[in-house]
Amino acid sequence: MSKSLAELRQSPRVGLPERSYSLCLASTLVAEVQALLTALEDARSAASAQQEDGKAAKPKRMADGGAVKKIRDRLAEVRGEMVEHTGSLTLRGIDEGKWRIWVGQHPAREGSDRDDRIAYGYCNADDLLDNLEQFAVAWNGDTLGAGDWEFIRSKAAPGDLLEIASLVVVMHESVIDVPKLLSSSPEILGDASD
């Protein structure tokens, strides 16, 4: 049963909208994963070509030894490192009135494809990117302190910053379909008997 308004006013769960964004700050590892995936594909193609040419009559599993195994092992190591360098950035919205004032002070530029793509035409995307600090509040649940946002921003991939800006707009301008969200929860969480 739903809580009364009096109970909701007392609930620590009630507040401004929040979203989280998974962010890897080790872009060198992302580049290495991409290179390893390409090398893995090349090594598999080479092994397959050898089998087709009859040069290697080994079964497929044996052909996976050597170069392919080394690449897979390194890929597993790098993916583990990526997990260590990836965190959850919590974004918190501002109240509707302040958001409207901010949007009014930073209107979308007429004919700006960038404002349409990133900020969905609601505001100036570049101004929003310059002001993301006011929405970023925590990393892995720990409140951001002085200098934390500057560090995150300097290490985040530019594409991630664009996604974060878009998420800020969505957080303020989109409706949350609570019935749909709640009905999908059992599928995500699994059966209580699991």
Image (cartoon, rainbow, N blue to C red):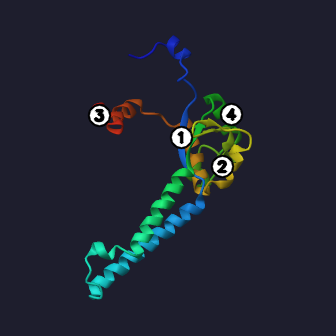
Is 32 left, or right, of 62 in this rendering? right
Q: Locate residue 123, reporting x and y percent.
A: 63, 44
> Is residue 116 visible from the viewing direction of this image?
no
Residue 20: numbered disc: 1
- Which secondary structure, mark 2? helix
Q: Is residue 44 above or below residue 8?
A: below
CA–CA distance between discs 1 and 4? 24 Å
Estimate how packed mark 3 is, as few (under 14), some (14 to 19) or many (20 or more) residues with alpha carbons within 10 Å.
few
Name the kind of residue labelled 2 in the image: Ile
CA–CA distance between discs 2 and 4? 27 Å
Work out whether mark 2 precedes mark 4 in sequence or the reverse, and give the earlier one.
Answer: 4
Task: Check if mark 1's residue and mark 4's residue have beta carbons within 8 Å.
Answer: no
Looking at the image, is mark 2 or mark 4 nearer the viewer? 2
Looking at the image, is mark 3 or mark 4 nearer the viewer? 3
CA–CA distance between discs 1 and 2? 14 Å
The residue identified by callout 4 is 101
The total of numbered circles placed on residues is 4
Q: Which quarter of the rendering shows the C terminus?
A: top left
Looking at the image, is mark 1 or mark 4 nearer the viewer? 1
Name the kind of residue labelled 4 in the image: Ile
CA–CA distance between discs 3 and 4? 45 Å
Q: Locate residue 51, reporting x and y percent.
A: 28, 83
- Which secondary structure, mark 4? helix
Task: Check if mark 1's residue and mark 3's residue have beta carbons within 8 Å.
Answer: no
- Which secondary structure, mark 1? strand
> Is residue 67 visible from the viewing direction of this image?
yes
Q: Locate residue 5, reporting x and y percent.
A: 50, 13
Asked whether 90 or 84 is in front, the reply is 84
Is 150 left, or right, of 187 in this rendering? right
Looking at the image, is mark 1 or mark 3 nearer the viewer? 3
Residue 191: numbered disc: 3
